[in-house]
Image (cartoon, rainbow, N blue to C red):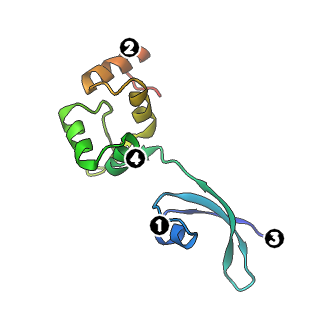
Amino acid sequence: MLLETYVLQDVAGPKVMGLTDNKSYVFAVLPDGNGGFTPCPTLKHIESLLVGATGAAKLLGVGKSLFYEMASTGRLGPLPILLTSKKKVWSRKELERWCDHRCPPRDQWLQILKEQNGNGEKKY
């Protein structure tokens, strides 16, 4: 039997599987004999390494407006990563580490990173 694995990233795919969120999932399918596929019952959620503002706000348990305010005032420690001239994302690992350090303001967070790494380079 041929087993194929797919990553669902669109809204319709997970809903077909009975899921109501927009997260990415990995699932396996088997041929159904009619030219289509039948999904296997096991799904595995994929955690994104990088998250946009909405995802970062959700991770931190704050609203999107507050997240943007924190980012613009320096209250949010981690700096965004510019993927393109218009697309900003944040490292999930850095956000988690920032929370582990009790969410210090940006200037303190950057100092913590510098002291931990010895050269100011970010390492997670």
SS label for mark 2? helix
Q: Which mark is residue 115?
A: 2
Q: Earlier in the sequence, mark 3 or mark 2?
A: 3
Q: CA distance from mark 3 to mark 2?
A: 55 Å
Residue 88 left/right relative to 16 = left
Could you tell me the amino acid type at mark 4? Val
Q: CA distance from mark 1 to mark 3?
A: 27 Å
Residue identifier under label 4: 51
| Residue name at image x 30 percent, y 34 percent | 79
**Other residues around mark 2 within 10 Å, as few (<14) / some (14–19) / many (≥20):** few
Q: Earlier in the sequence, mark 1 or mark 3?
A: 3
Q: Are marks 3 and 2 in contact (CB under 8 Å)?
A: no
Q: Earlier in the sequence, mark 4 or mark 1?
A: 1
SS label for mark 3? loop
Confirm whether residue 120 shows in the render.
Answer: no
Q: CA distance from mark 4 to mark 2?
A: 26 Å
The front one of 53 and 82 is: 53
Q: CA distance from mark 2 to mark 1?
A: 41 Å
**Other residues around mark 1 within 10 Å, as few (<14) / some (14–19) / many (≥20):** few
